[in-house]
Amino acid sequence: MTPEEFQELLLRYQRNEATAEEQQRIHAWYDRLAADSQEELPPTERPPLQAKLWSTIRERIDEPEPEIQIRPLRKAGWYVGVAASVLLVLSLGLWFWTQSSVNSGQLAVHTAAPLLTARGPQTLTLSDQSQVTLLEGSSLRYSSTFTGKLREVDLQGTAFFQITKNPEKPFLVHTGSLETKVLGTSFWVRHQPKQSYVQVQVVTGKVSVQKDQNQVILVPNQLVTYSREKPWLQTGLVQNPLVVDASVSMRFKDVPLLRVVERLEKRYGISLLIKQSALRQCPFTGDLTGLGLYEQLGMICQALNATYQSDGTQILLQGAGCR
């Protein structure tokens, strides 16, 4: 399978057009990719590693997959499935399927600096080896070299950033009146100037977002939104949280809900709160492997006659207690 064919497979997967067999191959590849992740290498060592990684990906995506067993949970009719397609695409650092209007505005980077407007999804490597993937119609103004105390860019549209770590020189993304500051991480920024809309979603690391004197700190699976209709920094959780610790098992046998929640918190880096003490010791049995967070919560609540809801950057679970 060529890189172009593999990319087309991922796109079909996101559009829910992939066959069941293709979906299984993508899920298996993603699990292996997470297991094989390595520490960041110096720029000089990246090209040979990239070639080796692609060779490995091609071999693994083409090899036959073992038979997958689907295990029923306690509730009849509920089965272990696979995570939603958006989860995989976001975790791979691909793009949102939305287009943003581009409009000239006030820039923090000098107007003489290079300006790139993407005619399609396009990745740019900056002078510090940071990478920015722009969606179609999005624009980035950036410096050819970062000579000052800061690394600054101006964004209009939507982009995915993978920032090279440099604690001595923070990286700033300017989107209208909002400023996103990082040291080294990966995150999405979506900026629609005409609507005065900005959203930042963190994939890895920690990000600071500031509007005037107001500031919020985001960690993986958190987001912040600012708009003309709601002119304040609104924090929340991403639609499809990514796994931050894949070593946490999602198989349970008569495990109290309190311990189940602790595992979910560690796996996703998200705070979960059980409101009623009577619910905390209710036992749960099931195999939630391969499901996204909200699917897992739905099956837990179905088994324990409970409910859940998002409240800012945490999730609340409620219920009368064990049946």
Image: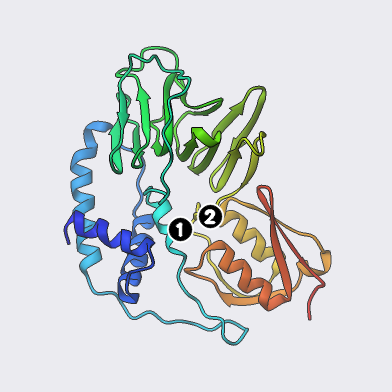
In the drawing, does residue 218 fall left or right of residue 259? left
Secondary element at tag 1 = helix
The amino acid type, in three-letter code, at marker 2 is Pro
In the drawing, does residue 143 fall left or right of residue 214? left
The residue lying at 61 percent from left, 60 percent from top is 263
Secondary element at tag 2 = loop
Counting from the top left corner in percent of width and height, residue 286 is at 58, 77
The residue lying at 53 percent from left, 45 percent from top is 220
Image quarter in which the C terminus is found = bottom right
The amino acid type, in three-letter code, at marker 1 is Leu
Above or below, comparing residue 306 to residue 242 in the picture: below
Above or below, comparing residue 242 to residue 219 in the picture: below
Counting from the top left corner in percent of width and height, residue 128 is at 33, 25
What scheme was used to colour the molecule? rainbow
Counting from the top left corner in percent of width and height, residue 170 is at 47, 23
Q: Which residue is mark 2?
A: 241
Which quadrant holds residue 185? top left
Near mark 2 (Cα within 10 A), the count class, few <14, some 14-19 or many ≥20, is many
- Of 58 and 124, the residue lying toward us: 124
Residue at mark 1 to residue at mark 2: CA–CA distance: 7 Å
Near mark 1 (Cα within 10 A), the count class, few <14, some 14-19 or many ≥20, is some
Q: Which residue is mark 1?
A: 87
- Of 321 and 127, the residue lying toward us: 127
The residue lying at 67 percent from left, 38 percent from top is 230
Q: Which mark is residue 135?
A: none
- Of 323 and 249, the residue lying toward us: 323
**Disc 1 to disc 2: CB gap under 8 Å:** yes
